[in-house]
Image (cartoon, rainbow, N blue to C red):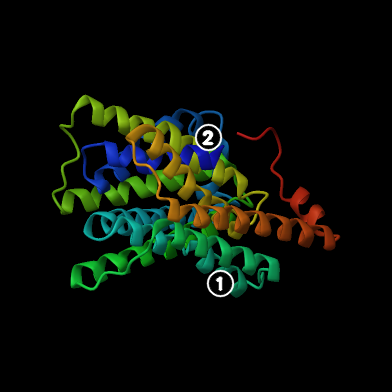
Amino acid sequence: MAVIAVSSSAPLIAFASAPALAIAFWRNGIAAAALTPVTLGPRRAEFLDVWRGEHRRAGAFCVLAGLALAAHFATWMPSVQLGSVATAAALVATQPVWQGLIAAGQGRRPSLAGWLGIALAVGGATWATGADFGVSRQAVFADALALVGGMAAAVYTALGERARTQISTMTYTWICYGTCAFVLLIVCLAAQIKIIGYEGTTWAAILAIVLGAQLLGHSMFNYALHRVSATTVSVLALIEVPGAALLAWAWLGQQPRAATLPGLALILTGVVVVILGSRTTRKSSPGSAALTDAADLPGPPP
């Protein structure tokens, strides 16, 4: 469900007549505003604990995750406008590689099946998007931005995984989105990017992004981080590539090239390999289920 929701983001961004960074600000700002009544209402006690109680360390991870998410939006979205969309999509799809390296640095090295699935998924994303590296200075700069965007997305997911071990999805998401929106607002104001005065169709597209890709998509990924590893979530997110292609075909008439179909198949194969590999690893570790149950928060999920 999260992948389907996130897949609507790229077609809606292409449809909306607004700067990419402004869209990124509004999608996070409106989402944070929508979550405020719950965070400061039923979840108020937990929110206060984040800042003055035992969950202060988790609160720091939330803020850092918001900064990483802002870095992701502030680098990858402009790279699409400065260079090739295909190259930007392929380079940001390297996120699972950085995720695997982060996990290895934390002493949780992915299994052989995990690395194989990551390689298949990233290779498939590169094939499907028809990556072609630019030769001009602007194209090289765009490529660098997209690569940094993939790294930032990996850091964002890894930090979210740490934060979600102690606090609920609602509190984590509100702090993360709010931090991201605040940083992006400063960037937009400093760069004199227009953030208001759009047409009604553009506002409708932005609201659709907020309801779908942000509140449903990203928030469900955040919820999944409580039970699924950051590496697995990153690889699953690559299904957005074929998902966005199908939506763009059905809505915008952008028919995918036949040459991309093998790449889409590789992405799905890589996702299956990673999921099956992670399930096998959990089954072979007797204490893994107990650790997961011990980390559960009391009460129903938000």
Q: Nearer the viewer, mark 2 or mark 1?
A: 1
Residue at (80, 53) in percent of width and height: 289
Q: Quadrant of residue 118?
A: bottom right
Residue 44 - label: 2
Please tell me in which quadrant of the rendered image residue 245 appears.
top left
Which comes sooner in the sequence, label 2 or label 1?
2
Q: Which mark is residue 125?
A: none
Left or right of residue 186, residue 34 in this image: right
**For mark 2, does the 10 Å Cα neighbourhood hold few (<14), some (14 to 19), or many (20 or more) residues?**
some
Q: Check disc 1 and report the residue beneath it.
A: 101
Question: Is disc 1 placed on a helix, strand or loop?
Answer: helix
Q: Secondary structure at mark 2?
A: helix
Residue 160 position, x and y percent, is 54, 54
Q: Where's residue 88, x and y in %?
A: 34, 60
Residue drawn at the location 72% of the way across and 61% of the way down: 277
Type of residue at label 2?
Answer: Arg
Number of callouts: 2
Q: Residues within 10 Å of mark 1 (few under 14, many from 20)?
A: some
Farthest residue, direction front: 258
In the rendered image, the quadrant that contains the N terminus is top right
Q: Which residue of the protein is positioned furthest toward the top in this rendering?
A: 200
Q: Is residue 174 visible?
A: no
